[in-house]
Image (cartoon, helix red, strand yellow):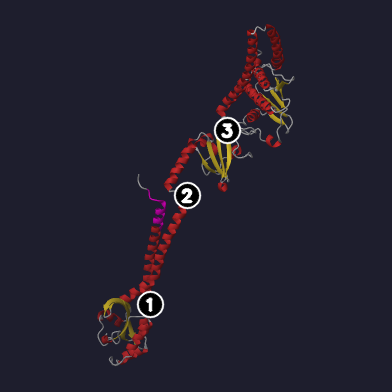
Amino acid sequence: MRKRVPLKFLIILIVALATIMSLGITGILLQHTIAVNEQKTINLRLRSSAQMAATDVTTIRALQNKADIANDSNIQKKSQQVAKINHLDFVVILNDQLIRLSHPDKQQIGKVFSSPKDASRALKGKQYFSTKKGILGMGYRYFSPIYDQHHNIIGVVVVGLTEDTITNSINTAEKPIIFGLILGCLLGIIGSLILAKYIKLILLNMEPYDIAEKLMEKNIIEDSMMEGLLAISNDYKIISKNTKAASLLPSIGSVNDVIDQEVYDSFFNDRLPDKQPKRTTFLGREFVYSTAKISKNNLGTVMLFRDITDFRDLVSELDGTRQYAQALRAQTHEFRNELQTILGLVELEKYDEISKLIPQLSKEYNDNIGYVTSRIKAPVISGFLIGKIKFAKEKNITVIIDSESYFPDENMEGIEMTNIIKIIGNLLDNAIEAVTKSENPIVKLLLKFNKKDGRVSITVTDNGYGVDDEIKNNIFNIGFSTKSGNRGYGLATIDEIVAMHNGSLSVKCSEGRETVFMISYIISNHLTERNENGL
């Protein structure tokens, strides 16, 4: 595997190189600018110095009088004075024969100028710069003619600086720049070190390729989930979503988009507690979901959800079957006990006892089963209720079917019959459990069906311990239960069935008193084809 370069090293290298390159280019440009400006300053100084020397009265008078060069020191002194004031290496006065009247090296006074051809142009009235090698070495010179009062050229003044002096002057001007560039490079390197450390701190000391791998792993894990995952910010923008969320809710939009208003109203705009399982219907599909606030930095809200439409009906039927099977199991258990009693009496040849027991069992049958079947004509429901009565009897709990109960033998759709069994079964189970600690536990059931409008009315009353108001407000939330274990789905299922039929569900209860559940809803198309055709 190819060795990867650490991020810290790359940051330091890139920032340092960028700093050095930018400062280097800046330094070159500044150096050029300084050299140009210094040259302009030198030119101005040479020109003004030459003008000063050329207009000096002492120099003009000496040239006019053609004084003895060897004995006249006024021109030499004046030249040295001008050179000192203007920081020049030399100021040379030439007469019209180009003989030196002054020079830094006194031995050169009285001799012909070293570059007569270069100086002769000044005798023609020219002012110019020249670079030539002279007595003092390579020099930068400025020539200017000297005029008398009649504007006649009587001599030439040559002022200049040696190449070494110019170089030293430029170097002196560049020293602060060079120092600044070095300091800037050092500060850039130090800054790159601090920046690298800060970025690593932000990245939790992880390398970019580590972050990329973790992000890929996160996306793979999220996209492997059977549930949809959707997170939104406080300003309703989508922070994250997985593939399942996009397939379940195609209209939610993309990451950084504002979430669809209908999706928000269906899933996020509720007042139920965080992490509490909830159900909703969206675009004809039913979903179970839970939401939670992203607590760190208050980023927003995350939701997990699943489409339960396809297996909801299957679960509903299985739940109804479970209720029915439980009732049949209790009924079978009681019949087995009675048969075993009769069998034991037969083996003991206690025929008189058998003759007494059978009428007693017959009476109990008529009192219980006959009472139920005379009011509840639907075999499925009556058989289910008989089983529930016997199941409660084993626990010394009395289940009473109200004398006003009536349910005809309607050949309803299987799902509707299952819904009724689920409602009765869950309410009776809760009521039986609620009265276990009562002195005289009684559970009452009133079941009615109106054939004209298809209205089902179910009322279950128990004399248990009741329900306080705080719990009452949450009992229909999915997953909520006052009991331990995987509970809290029965009443939520009832609430869902009633809501699906636009029915009503009410609870009258108080702590320490009886509890009454009242349910009413209409089954549309409740008559079967057999009923509609009079068969």
Dot 2: what SS? loop
Category of crowding for the residue at label 3, using alpha-carbon neighbours closer than 10 angstroms: few (below 14), some (14–19), many (at least 20): some
Q: Nearer the viewer, mark 1 or mark 3?
A: 3
- The residue closer to the viewer here, 430 or 129, is 430
Q: Nearer the viewer, mark 2 or mark 3?
A: 2
**Left or right: 133 in relation to 195:** left
- The residue closer to the viewer here, 264 or 393, is 393
- The residue closer to the viewer here, 422 or 236, is 422
Q: Label 1: which residue?
A: 44
Residue 136 to residue 265: above or below: below
Magenta stretch bounds: 4-15
Residue ranking furthest to the front: 348
Q: Quadrant of the C terminus?
A: top right
Residue 70 to residue 271: above or below: below
Residue 358 visible, this orientation: yes
Residue 127, image x, y percentages? 33, 79
Residue 54 visible, this orientation: no
Q: Label 3: which residue?
A: 287
Q: Amino acid at mark 3?
A: Phe
**Gap between marks 1 and 3 measured at Cα:** 89 Å
Q: Label 2: which residue?
A: 204
**Gap between marks 2 and 3 measured at Cα:** 37 Å
Residue 351, image x, y percentages? 67, 6
Category of crowding for the residue at label 2, using alpha-carbon neighbours closer than 10 angstroms: few (below 14), some (14–19), many (at least 20): few
**Left or right: 472 in relation to 53:** right
